[in-house]
């Protein structure tokens, strides 16, 4: 992904306002689109998702649950060294051997079952072919992925966006936290439920051009912002590229409460 390919897309669409997301008057872009622009200018392209093949990306989306990317990289390196980074190899290797290679990623027994389940699904419905998998209509494929053991909405959408290049926005704890701290999270989405996930996904998708490249970059930029600035405790607002959008009542310079403290009474963040 290059900067030159992403920038022109940022000015192509103007989205309609929805509850809690006003149009940014000065630029004509939706507020979320303006956030994207600010993050892209600050951090540049993130080059997600790291992976040499679509299957490796899918493996990464499954292994990254509840662990750091460094641990995922170690597990993927094990799989590569053992020549197990293909659906056919994962299908035939024993669960015990696969578990051994996945151990660095944590929860390795669960992840062994998830990876085996995904590959079983791939063979049962798509003859083991990722081309056939991604030729399936997106909504149908998403429903099918969600029925696979160990694949929840965030993993399904990561597979569809990063491996399938489908325009699905990936919602995570960081995106939820940033929206909430900026007073952009609709009341009905203020829970950690599956319904709330879908509402936040819909909010992003309806206020941005349905461009997989943009969704790819925006999600990666949100993760970067969450890691560098929007921490669960003690967010580093003054140095954050989104600080100018922080509601005045929550800004550290105008309140003794941090954005975390000011909201904690209203919603329990992930
Ligand atoms: S660190 Fe502060 S300014 Fe940055 S996204 Fe979080 S709440 Fe907003």
Image (cartoon, helix red, strand yellow):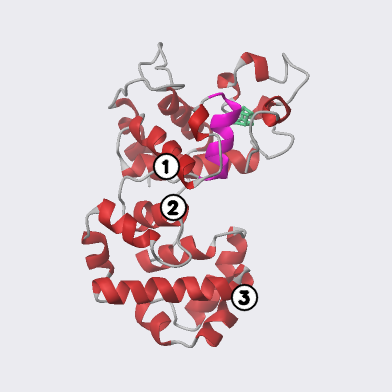
Q: Quadrant of residue 244?
A: top right
Mark 3 → mark 1, Cα distance in angstroms:
32 Å
Identify the disc placed on residue 53: none
Query: Magenta region's main secondary structure?
Result: helix
Q: In the displayed orientation, state which residue is furthest to the right.
A: 256
Q: Is residue 185 visible?
A: no
Residue 71 inside the magenta-drawn segment? no
Disc on the earlier residue, 2 or 3: 3
Query: How many badges with numbers are in the image?
Result: 3
Assess whether mark 1 and mark 3 are in contact (beta carbons under 8 angstroms): no
The residue carrying mark 3 is 103
**Horizontal and vertical percent for residue 261?**
73, 28
Assess whether mark 1 and mark 2 are in contact (beta carbons under 8 angstroms): yes
Identify the disc placed on residue 198: 1
> Comparing marks 3 and 1, which lies closer to the viewer?
1
The residue carrying mark 2 is 153
Q: Is residue 219 visible?
A: yes
Disc on the earlier residue, 2 or 1: 2
Who's the residue at 56% across and 26% down the image?
Answer: 242
Highlighted range, magenta: 172-183
Q: Quadrant of ligand 1?
A: top right
Disc on the earlier residue, 3 or 1: 3
Q: The residue tagged with tag 3: helix, strand or loop?
A: helix
Who's the residue at 30% across and 50% down the image?
Answer: 166
Is ligand 1 less than 8 Å from the beta carbon at label 2? no
Q: The residue tagged with tag 1: helix, strand or loop?
A: helix
Relative to the observer, which residue lies in front, 80 or 139? 139
Mark 2 → mark 3, Cα distance in angstroms:
24 Å
Who's the residue at 42% across and 80% down the image?
Answer: 90
């Amino acid at each position: 992904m290059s900067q030159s390919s992403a920038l022109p897309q940022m000015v192509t669409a103007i989205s309609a306002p929805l509850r809690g997301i006003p149009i940014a008057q000065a630029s004509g872009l939706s507020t979320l689109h303006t956030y994207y622009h600010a993050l892209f200018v600050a951090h540049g392209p993130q080059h997600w998702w790291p992976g040499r093949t679509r299957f490796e990306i899918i493996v990464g989306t499954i292994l990254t649950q509840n662990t750091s990317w460094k641990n995922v990289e170690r597990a993927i390196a094990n799989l590569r060294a053992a020549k197990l980074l293909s659906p056919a190899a994962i299908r035939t290797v024993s669960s015990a051997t696969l578990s051994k290679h996945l151990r660095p990623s944590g929860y390795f027994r669960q992840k062994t079952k998830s990876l085996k389940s995904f590959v079983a699904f791939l063979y049962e419905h798509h003859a083991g072919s990722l081309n056939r998998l991604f030729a399936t209509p997106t909504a149908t494929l998403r429903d099918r992925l969600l029925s696979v053991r160990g694949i929840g909405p965030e993993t399904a959408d990561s597979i569809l966006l990063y491996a399938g290049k489908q325009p699905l926005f990936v919602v995570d704890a960081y995106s939820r936290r940033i929206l909430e701290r900026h007073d952009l999270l609709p009341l009905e989405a203020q829970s950690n439920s599956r319904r709330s996930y879908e509402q936040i996904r819909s909010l992003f998708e309806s206020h941005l051009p349905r461009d997989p490249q943009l969704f790819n970059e925006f999600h990666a930029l949100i993760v970067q912002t969450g890691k560098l600035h929007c921490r669960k405790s003690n967010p580093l607002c003054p140095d954050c590229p989104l600080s100018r959008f922080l509601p005045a009542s929550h800004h550290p310079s105008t309140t003794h409460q941090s954005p975390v403290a000011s909201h904690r009474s209203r919603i329990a963040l992930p």
